Image (cartoon, rainbow, N blue to C red):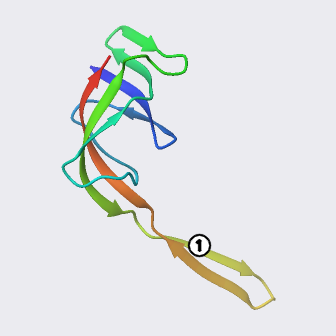
Amino acid sequence: MIYAIVNINGIQTRVAPDEVLSVARTSGAPGDMLTFDQVLMVADGEKIAIGQPYLKGAVLTAELVEHLRGPKLRIFKFKRRREYRRRRGYRDELTRIRVSAIKV
C-alpha cells in the first residue's frame, strides 16, 4: 500500500490514493484538480523515500470535492463570583479533497 506525508496549508497530513479528507480552506471551485508539491515522505510497501525537507519531483494531485464548514465549537469563559460570563463560538472553513495520485 502506498501512502505519503504531505504539507497541506502548513499541516503535515498522511494521505493515500482514493482517500477523501478534509483540509483547511483552499482556493478553487468544486471539480478543480489541485497539486501539492511539498511531499515529505512516500512509502510503497517496504520502499520508503524521505525528503530533506521535500522530495524532488514528488507531486500529490487531488480533486476538490466541496467547500464546507466544520462543527461549531463553543467557547465559554467564566469567573466565579464576578458575574463574568462570555459565550463565543466558531466553525472552521474546510475543503474536502479526494486524492487521485501520488507521483514520485
Residue that extends furthest to the top in the rendered view of this protein: 47
Within 10 Å of disc 1 (Cα), the crowding (few <14, some 14-19, many 20+) is few
- Asked if residue 17 is positioned above or below residue 98 in the image, the reply reads above
Residue 45's spot in the image, x, y percent? 31, 12
Q: Residue at x 27, y 33 (%)?
A: 61
Task: Please indicate whether residue 37 sits to the left or right of residue 85 in the image.
Answer: left
Task: Please indicate whether residue 79 sits to the left or right of residue 62 in the image.
Answer: right
Which quadrant is home to the C terminus? top left
> Which residue is identified by label 1?
75
- Asked if residue 28 is positioned above or below residue 92 in the image, the reply reads above
Report the number of numbered marks.
1
Residue 1 lies in quadrant: top left
Label 1: state its secondary structure: strand
Residue that extends furthest to the right in the rendered view of this protein: 81
Residue 67's spot in the image, x, y percent? 30, 59
Q: Residue at x 30, y 51 (%)?
A: 96
- Asked if residue 15 is positioned above or below residue 77 in the image, the reply reads above
Q: Residue at x 59, y 73 (%)?
A: 75
Q: Residue at x 32, y 35 (%)?
A: 35
Residue 72 lies in quadrant: bottom left
Residue that extends furthest to the left in the rendered view of this protein: 31
Task: Please indicate whether residue 53 sits to the left or right of residue 104 in the image.
Answer: right
Residue 5's spot in the image, x, y percent? 42, 28
Question: Callout 1, which amino acid?
Answer: Ile
In the foreground, 27 or 60:
27
In the foreground, 13 or 36:
36
Residue that extends furthest to the bottom in the rendered view of this protein: 83
